[in-house]
Image: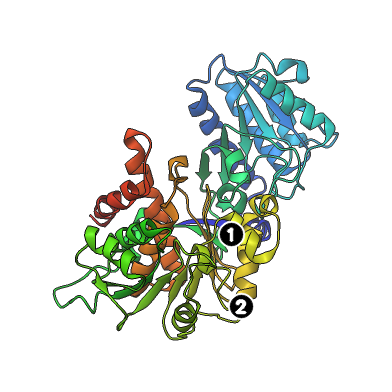
Amino acid sequence: MRRAHTVEQVRTAEAELMAKLPEGTLMQRAAGGLAVAIGNFLGRTYGARVVLLIGSGDNGGDALYAGARLARRGAQVIAVLLSDHAHAEGLTALQAAGGRVGSTDDIPAADVVVDGIVGIGGRPGLRSEALAAVTLAADHQVPIVAVDTPSGVDVDTGETPEPHVHAALTVTFGTHKICHLVDPAASACGPVHLIDIGLDLPDAPVQSLQPDDVRALYPIPDTHSDKYSRGVLGLIAGSTQYPGAAVIATTGALAGPLGMLRYVGPDAVASAVLAVHPEVVVGEGRVQAWAVGSGLSDETLDRELFDRVTQQQDLPVVVDAGGITALDADRAGYVVITPHAGELSQLIGVPREEIEARRLHYAREVAEDRQLVVLLKGATTVVAAPDGSAYVNPIATPWLATAGSGDVLAGLLGSLLAGGVPEFEAAAVAAYLHAAAGQLAAADGPITAMKVAAALPEVTRQILL
């Protein structure tokens, strides 16, 4: 599991550890790891030209001590002081090792710029001097390595309301921070390199599944399993206008762990489903979960059937697309909704751009207000639970932005619910597998939703090995 903690959690853990260690030990641990990461990023140390942008925080001290280590290994290290309160001991160490204080005029000739401007307690945005230095680096295509987090982002939310650093690499300490996982800030981090400095941390409010976690959560049949114990999913999807949505959602569901799928919908759509998947049972019957809404709209939704299904309080249900706004506002528990930003905008009346800018915030807000799980689709999918906990999907491919991709996800998620995976975890597992299948399918170029669904069994096999 990849875990991301809040600033308060990190600072508390750092204070507890520093109380047990000789003064300066923690900073030296961070600086040592940072120096190695910068050297690896450059591919060399001797002769490398390194410019440090130094603010007043402790990460400025980390950068200065790391610069001293690089200078001792033959790098040309220059510190640009953006504050009158730079870390004094770190600056002394840098100069003693052969580094010097310079100006922004040194940036264009640098091989790398190190962002030590503000630490995890910094507010969004950059002061004018810092912004000018960062802009100069960007104009001359000098890569930036961020210390802990890119300066100017909101560390605890992943939001970027003000100008900020766009890093080619972020080197962080102790644990990931929320901005490392949540867009739009995550996109400003580049690859994130984590250095263990020995922090003892509590449970993290934001996490990302890794393959081992998916393997542990996935319901694998045993010798005593039958089609009913493996899970039966009821699917209400597609319409005479969009029959393909039912076929695609069915394909996604059958690529999951369930034992049987029941399709409920118009005869013409059922015929289209059976033409591709003759194993599907048409008509209502006993199920362990429902997936509803893909390919439906206000005009094509059978309201009586939809209400009857979604109001069964004892069964989990995934509600996609046209079903999201039709869902009873009081229906809570055992429900996962799967909107993209536009659909969430329609649901809560907030502009889409605002939702894209504050993805974690709005996913959490709707989850808490409606007491259900929200799977907010996007470049980094956010899954939020009513208690504020969140999973962020760590993998994605832009090729998944294709018609029907969400139908595959809804079917797969319904399959996991029918297999007994709890709603919050099922949504995270479905998002992970869906993105991984998209990556596999896109290995040869552009993809379709059916290609994504077809890649799911192979992706699952690779993870379960």
Q: Nearer the viewer, residue 255 or 112?
A: 255
Residue bearing mark 2: 329
Inspect the image, locate mark 1, and give the three-letter code of the amino acid beneath it.
Answer: Glu
Q: Which mark is residue 435?
A: none
Residue bearing mark 1: 343
Asked if residue 25 shows in the view, the reply is no
Sequence-wise, which precedes: disc 1 or disc 2?
2
| Scheme by which the image is coloured | rainbow
| Quadrant hosting residue 212 | bottom left
Q: How many numbered circles are shown?
A: 2
Q: Residue at x 55, y 50 (%)?
A: 181
Inspect the image, locate mark 2, and give the three-letter code of the amino acid beneath it.
Answer: Ala
How busy is the neighbourhood of tag 2: few (under 14 within 10 Å), some, or many (20 plus)? few
Distance from Cα at disc 1 to Cα at disc 2? 15 Å
Q: Is residue 199 above or below residue 260?
A: above
| Quadrant hosting residue 88 | top right
Query: Could you say whether the residue bearing mark 2 is in a helix, strand or loop?
Result: loop
| Quadrant hosting residue 24 | top right
Q: Nearer the viewer, residue 464 or 110?
A: 464
Pick out the residue farthest to the right: 84
Q: Residue at x 52, y 44 (%)?
A: 195
Residue 390 in the image, given as x and y percentages of width and height: 55, 63
How busy is the neighbourhood of tag 1: few (under 14 within 10 Å), some, or many (20 plus)? some
Tell me the quarter of the image containing the N terminus.
bottom left
